[in-house]
Image (cartoon, rainbow, N blue to C red):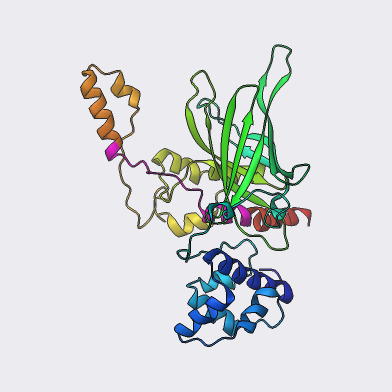
Amino acid sequence: MGKIDKEKYYCMISERIRYALHELGYTQAELVKLCQEQGYDIKQSSISKITSSATGLSIMNVVGISKVLNLDLSEVLSTESNTVLTLPQRKIERESSNYFITRADDKVFEPYLGTYVCYFYPTKSSENRLIKGEFSFSKSVDSSECEVKISFKTGKKNEENEEIRKEYSGTACISLSMNTIYCSVSNKEIGEICYIVFSFIPILYEKLECRLGGVLTSSAGDNRLPTMQRILLSKKELSDDMLYFLEGQLLMNQSEILLSQNAFNAMLKDDRFPDAFKEYFCDSESGNRFSNILPMPYFYLYESMIRDSFMSEEDKIKSICLLRKYSAAAKYNKVGGKADQIVYKFLTEIADKNNDDKKI
């Protein structure tokens, strides 16, 4: 961890306490009463100092307030500016209009405004390359809206042998209750609407470096089908070496990591795979399997095998439904906070360190 400015650090703590009070719906007077009810004596003037500036910040009061509000103290005191503050159940319901921030001149939008390089996979199964494009958050002319624009080359050419470029435009809003940025964009030329969702993390004194998001769109090809995928935004263009490591974060991952034996063997032969992993997790004798982890056999089959069989239509449908029911498929797919943190740390710490080492 690099050296951090003390005043800047205290301001981060102050902002998190202020954010928690705002989101949970407590006034300073209500917090004083709540603290007293839980046996912690604090004056309203002390709370005012904590939430208004870095001066007069008492760590003991911060600890007390965090305990009363049921906040994770490690998050409140974190030195990382992109730390997500986990909030307990909201105390009160607010008017729905207060949940959404749509004006681009609102201070919560400021760290997100700008142009990013975006990366995502094509929605055609025969294509494995990553698509690179441009993604921007910007103020409308009167700042009443946050405009979103996406532009990328499809990798295909038209009849004039010119590269086909797709462009989408729309707006974004921030939901403070959901800690989410919602984007709705459309391409009027082809009549397509896409929805993109990012985690909203209050950022202090810095600009957004990178963020993973989820996309709901229509697939490419002749059959336009509802499709979910991931997208990565990065403030800087990523090198091929960076993408080699990060492209796996654009797959529809879940907590379990399932590898076939063939994929596992290929991974161990990858020159860029850390030797430390092999020493820590792999069997020292054979070297081609995990130690202390028993392999589990899985059956691998395509739905088309069932559909093309000679069974009756009823038996085909029932078989497919029950195969899906008993399969290892997840009920949903989250773009988790840990995935965002892995990407952020890779780009801001590991990749930068490797670049510095190459310069020496």
For residue 220, what is the image quadrant?
top right
Q: Is residue 303 above or below residue 264?
A: above
Q: Which residue sits at x=73%, y=15%?
A: 161
Q: Give the range drawn in magenta.
A: 325-345
For residue 27, what is the image quadrant?
bottom right
Image coordinates of residue 296 in percent, x first then y, are 31, 46
Magenta region includes residue 74: no
The one of 329 and 278 positioned closer to us in this rendering: 329
Image coordinates of residue 324 in percent, x first then y, are 30, 35
Count every numbered label the image shows and give the total: 0
Residue 58 visible in the shown view:
no
Image coordinates of residue 17 in percent, x first then y, are 60, 71
On the rendered image, what quadrant is the N terminus found in? Answer: bottom right
The one of 12 and 231 positioned closer to us in this rendering: 12
Q: In this view, does 317 lie to the left or right of 92?
A: left
Residue 189 visible in the shown view:
yes
Looking at this rendering, what residue extends furthest in the top direction?
A: 159
Q: In this view, does 205 lie to the left or right of 177?
A: right
Q: Is residue 246 left or right of residue 252?
A: right
Image coordinates of residue 152 in percent, x first then y, are 68, 31
Q: Which residue sits at x=69%, y=49%?
A: 103
Q: Which residue sits at x=50%, y=56%?
A: 277
